[in-house]
Amino acid sequence: MTQEKTKEFTGRHMLIIMLSFFGVIVSVNMVLMFSAIGTFPGLEVKSSYVASQTFDKRAAEQNALGWMPSVSYTDGVLILRIDTENGPVIPASIVAKIGRPTYSGEDQNVEFFLGALDHRANVTLTSGPWRVFINAVAPDGTLFETRLHLIVPDS
């Protein structure tokens, strides 16, 4: 009669299993952490406290303008329209940036040219969600800042 030799489960086996288990968990967490940090677009303002000190005043001035901006995208052209109750507005200057909500790799500065009743820019955007950051100056010198959401449909 032959006897089958069975392998014993030892502390060494348990150690290997535990190190493998936690090694996989730590590795996955590290990959996710570096991925999150690498795609973080960064801070919006250097000091939130300093920015908050003038927020109410700036918001009141901006609301007094009565501007209602809207943005659309068709055939490679980004169209920004700023209206009031009295009709369209042409700001003294506009600085704009467009980018993805969660990824800064596709951010691009936008240079608008004046259309008939709006501002237009030639940009290439892929489908999906985008944010348009607008910094405009009214003819009276009031700063107008806003963030507009844009969804580009699948082609």
Image: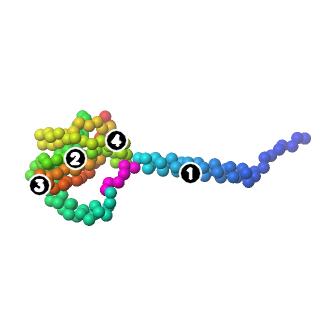
Secondary structure under badge 3?
A: loop
Q: Which residue is tagged 3?
A: 140
Q: Which is nearer the N-term, disc 3 or disc 1?
A: 1
Residue 43 lies in magenta, yes or no? Answer: yes
The local crowd at label 3, few if under 14, some if 14 to 19, many if 20 or more residues have their Cα within 10 Å, is few
Asked whether, in this view, residue 90 is left or right of residue 1, the answer is: left
The CA distance from mark 3 to mark 4 is 34 Å
Q: Which residue is tagged 2?
A: 95
Query: Residue drawn at (17%, 51%), measured in percent from left and top?
Result: 137
The local crowd at label 2, few if under 14, some if 14 to 19, many if 20 or more residues have their Cα within 10 Å, is some
Q: Where is residue 155 in the image (x, y as percent from the top left)?
A: 31, 34
Q: Where is residue 110 in the image (x, y as percent from the top left)?
A: 25, 42
The local crowd at label 1, few if under 14, some if 14 to 19, many if 20 or more residues have their Cα within 10 Å, is few
Q: Where is residue 142 in the image (x, y as percent from the top left)?
A: 16, 56
Q: What stretch is highlighted in magenta?
A: 40-45
Given this view, does label 3 or label 1 mark the residue nearer the observer? 3
Given this view, does label 3 or label 4 mark the residue nearer the observer? 3
Q: Which residue is tagged 1?
A: 26
Q: Can residue 150 be seen in this view?
A: no
Q: From this viewpoint, which residue is outermost toward the left?
A: 86
The local crowd at label 4, few if under 14, some if 14 to 19, many if 20 or more residues have their Cα within 10 Å, is few
Q: Which is nearer the N-term, disc 1 or disc 2?
A: 1
Q: Where is residue 13 in the image (x, y as percent from the top left)?
A: 72, 50
